[in-house]
Image (cartoon, rainbow, N blue to C red):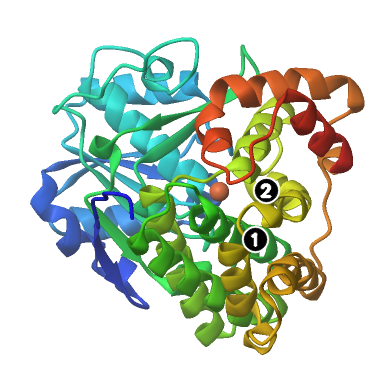
Amino acid sequence: MHDFTCTMPKIIFGNGKVREIGVLVKGYGRKVFLAIDPFLDRQGVTHEITGVLERESLVVFPFSGIESNPDCFSVDKAGCLAKEQKCDFVLAVGGGSVIDFGKGVAVVAGNPETSWKYTRRKDHSPLIPGKTTLPVIAVPTTAGTGSETTHFSVLSNPELREKSTIAHERIFPRLAVIDPELTVTMPSGLTALTGIDVLAHAIESYINVKATPYSKMVGIEAIRLVATYLPQASSNGRNMTAREHMAWASTLAGIAIAHANPTLPHALAQAAGGYIHAPHGGSVAACLPEIMKISYMADLESFGEIAVALDPSVSELPGYRCAEKSVELVERLFRDIGCSVRFGDFGLIEDNIERVTEIAMTGYFTGINLHPRIVDRDEIMRIYRACL
Ligand SMILES: [Fe+2]
């Protein structure tokens, strides 16, 4: 068994908790940089949350100019704004892009350099965010990224057409407020893709060569919950039982990847997704089954346990057959939720494969190295072709 450390953010979970946000965050300072999803801003949510915060005498600087796959230059501008306004902490309300954006703002506002210099890449040693990094409080509005319980901020660099990650405990949210009611308005397609992201986090952290008993414990529970509740949440978004369990699955899977990083599917999804600006869940869904197909032989025990979590009726199968079954069960889940995407759907073409392979091997080498099956450049190119 590897040595390991457990780190848990403070989690407040429950329907309607967002309405208590003023009381929940007021101990973190007086000036709030509120990073909020532009869709929620258009729905008047910024106004509502600002009102709740102001009732607790907090000063709010709302910021909603946030795109999906947040870019490092926008983060830098917003971070400078938060620094100028002497904000005490960042409150991020939205999906993974918004929370990752908020974490980047917290780094830039509390440190001297631009955000990209803090990202983890093969061609330079990342700068370390200092103690002055602003505290982050996260309120997710999707059940997907798990960013509310991780120390990762994935940023895009549009000049390089690459994504990379700030990974440091100082951007671990101090508080995650999980309110399943916030996920009710997610349309079926988004529910499906964000749900597959949850599944991928759980599976990848489970098969990670450095998985720990703790990451495995939370990951396997997330897989069980996704198998039962994702089809229900996807077919009826008003099913609160399904929404609550998916919100919890997302939280657990986030905790799992905070303790055992994602592996090959996320490495290849991030590299391609950053290059063609594809939605994160879609990029992950495009390659997860194919990568499982070529990987289960490398860790029959873990893949067998994943299969049983997806469908307990396969538990009597022999080990090899059970592990193999995990691929079929994930493909069945994809069919059940109507999820069928390929990288080509988001604009990736054959001519891009060499470049995105380079990006994966440069910016996402950690995930590649933690995958149970060793893959080289030719194998990565083959996977991209198979998922095109
Ligand atoms: Fe993800």
Amino acid type at image mark 2: Val
Q: Position of residue 223 (x, y in %)?
A: 55, 71
Q: What SS does tag 2 mark?
A: helix
Residue 356 visible in the displayed image: yes
Judge from the rendering whether residue 329 lies leftward or rightward of residue 44; answer left or right. right
Residue 174 place in picture, x, y as percent: 21, 50
Residue 200 image point, x, y percent: 60, 56
* Residue type for callout 1: Ile
Position of residue 149 relative to residue 319, above or below, is above
Label 2, ligand 1: CB separation under 8 Å? yes
In the image, residue 222 sits, relative to residue 84, either above or below, namely below
| Image quadrant occupied by the C terminus | top right
Helix, strand or loop under label 1: helix
Residue picked out by circle 2: 284
The reply, left or right, for residue 166 in relation to residue 278 is left
Residue positioned 52% across, 63% down in the render: 143
* Residue under pointer 1: 196
Q: Earlier in the sequence, mark 1 or mark 2?
A: 1
Instruction: Tell me: 335 left or right of 34.
Output: right
- The quarter of the rendered structure image containing the N terminus is bottom left
Mark pair 1, 2: CA separation: 8 Å
Q: Residue furthest right?
A: 350
Q: Could you say which quadrant of the image residue 131 lies in? A: top left
For the question of whether residue 63 can be seen, the reply is no
Which one is nearer the viewer's eye here, 323 or 255?
Answer: 323
Q: Residue at x 67, y 87 (%)?
A: 316
The residue sitting at 42% across, 25% down in the picture is 75
Asked whether disc 1 touches disc 2, contact meaning CB atoms under 8 Å apart, the reply is yes
Closest to the observer, 272 or 47: 272
Image point (82%, 52%), residue name: 341
The quadrant holding residue 18 is bottom left
